[in-house]
Image (spheres, grey):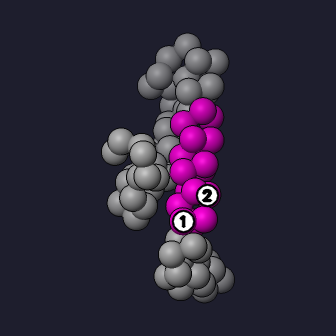
């Protein structure tokens, strides 16, 4: 737990510069896309969007994409 807190603090401190924040947001957007693809693939394989096996993937997708919406502004030229 302590190591996770240290890593999270380092990430937040590292995102204080604009260039680093843009790079961090780009990475978070990619994680959101990957999580979305993984959840969709699971739902497709299970033939049911509400499958209990897919629920953890759906939760990760929702949390990851929510962080992107809260923390990052959309890239210039992209609608919200």
Residue at left 50%, top 17%?
48
Give the quarter of the figure containing the N terminus: bottom right
Q: Is residue 14 left or right of residue 69?
A: right
Residue linked to disc 2: 27
Q: Main secondary structure of the magenta part?
A: helix
Q: Is residue 71 left or right of residue 64?
A: left
**Residue 13 location, x and y as percent?**
53, 85
**Residue 60 location, x and y as percent?**
52, 48
Q: Is residue 71 visible?
A: yes
The tag earlier along the polypeptide, 1 or 2, is 1
Can residue 62 be found in the magenta stretch?
no
Residue linked to disc 1: 22
- Asked if residue 18 is positioned above or below residue 70 in the image, the reply reads below
In the image, 5 versus 34, the foreground residue is 34
Farthest-out residue, front: 77
Mark 1 or 2, which is nearer the eye? 1
Farthest-out residue, top: 47
Can residue 25 be found in the magenta stretch?
yes
Q: CA distance from mark 1 to mark 2?
A: 9 Å
In the image, 31 versus 74, the foreground residue is 74
Give the quarter of the figure containing the C terminus: top left
- Asked if residue 13 is positioned above or below residue 41 in the image, the reply reads below
| Tally of numbered tags | 2
Residue interval drawn in magenta: 22-38
């Amino acid at each position: 737990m302590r190591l996770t807190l240290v890593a999270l603090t380092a990430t937040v401190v590292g995102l204080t510069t604009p260039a680093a924040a843009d790079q961090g947001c780009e990475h978070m957007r990619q994680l959101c896309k990957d999580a979305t693809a993984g959840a969709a693939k699971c739902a497709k394989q299970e033939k049911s969007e509400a499958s209990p096996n897919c629920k953890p993937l759906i939760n990760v997708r929702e949390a990851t994409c929510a962080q992107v919406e809260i923390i990052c502004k959309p890239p210039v030229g992209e609608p919200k």
